[in-house]
Structure formats: C-alpha cells, structure tokens
Image (cartoon, grey):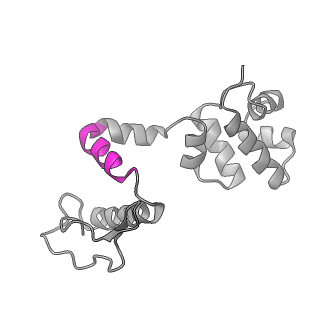
Amino acid sequence: MAFNSRFGRRVRALRAEHGWGLRKFAKVVGVSPTYLSKIERGEFPPPAEDKVVAIADALGQDRDELLALAGRIASDLAEVIRARPKELAALLRVIRDLPPDAVAALAEMARRMAAEGGEGGGGGEHRDRPQELSVRHRDGIAEEPPEYLP
C-alpha cells in the first residue's frame, strides 16, 4: 500500500540535494535507516510530528510546510484553533484564496497588532497601515482592504 509518497519523495530529494547519506541522516533525525528508507519510498506513512520537525530542521526547510506535506498540522496550531474555532475557521475561509503575498501582509499586520497590545489594537487609528496593501482577486481586480483592517 502506498502512503504519502509525495512527502517521502520530497524528503529523499532534499536529503540528496544536501548531500546527506541515508544512514547519517536517519541518525541525525532519530530514526532507523530502514524506517527512513520506507518513508522515502512511500511504503510507510510520514512519521510523527516531532520527527517531521527534526527532518525539516536538518534540511533547513519550513516546519509547517513539511508538516502539511506529511498531512499534519503543528500541535501548537491545533491548540490555537481549538481555543478560538469559530473566529479562526472564519478567518481561514476568508483568506483561503488570497495570494501568498496578501496573506503574508495580513500576518505582518497581526504581528504588529499583537506587539501593540493585541485585543483591538488601541483606539481606531491605523497610523502604520501599509500603503501598498491591496487584495488581488482571481479576476485581477485590486481592492483596498476593509477599513477595519489596520
């Protein structure tokens, strides 16, 4: 039975790209060479979160991207979603089709809001609203974000 072979193929390609041998890499990430080989060939499912994170770190890859390729979500994100399921589900559904740069801009605005004190952001003025922020829809039309976004 073939499991998530995309994950395994990606790990194998990255490992080879970095010049890691199977045995040495397996030792670094804390798995047996046989187990790693079977994962890379798609004979076993991707490993648990801690091993996927170890693989990502050893290969210099983004942990969340490799976890997603493994069909997993980081446990800290699952906790965040469980704490505010309604709001976060709504947010994710709204931004699902935005281009990556628009999502990155939203994340940066959220980081700034959190640094300024979080809950509500401090009074209605949005002095540091990025001038370049606009959302491009699939039809190519650009529109400014709603006024409630900083």
Residue at far front of view? 139
Which residue is at a point 41% across and 60% down the rendered structure image? 138
- Depth check: 28 or 4 in front? 4
Which residue is at a point 78% across and 32% down the rendered structure image? 41
Q: Give above or below for 142 relative to 26.
A: below
- Depth check: 81 or 147 in front? 147
Which residue is at a point 79% across and 30% down the rendered structure image? 32
- Image position, residue 122 (x, y; %): 16, 68
Across the whole image, how many numbered discs are drawn on residues?
0
Q: In the drawing, does residue 132 fall left or right of residue 125?
A: right
Q: Give above or below for 93 relative to 136.
A: above
Q: In the drawing, does residue 89 fall left or right of residue 23?
A: left
- Image position, residue 16 (x, y; %): 83, 49
- Image position, residue 88 (x, y; %): 30, 45
Which residue is at a point 27% across and 65% down the rendered structure image? 113
- Image position, residue 92 (x, y; %): 35, 47
Q: In the drawing, does residue 36 fall left or right of residue 4?
A: right
- Depth check: 97 or 17 in front? 97
Quadrant of the rendering where the N terminus is positioned: top right
Quadrant of the rendering where the C terminus is positioned: bottom left
The region drawn magenta spans: 83-96
Q: Is residue 84 magenta?
A: yes
Residue at far top of view? 1
Q: Quadrant of residue 48?
A: top right
Magenta stretch: helix, strand or loop mostly: helix
Q: Quadrant of residue 39?
A: top right
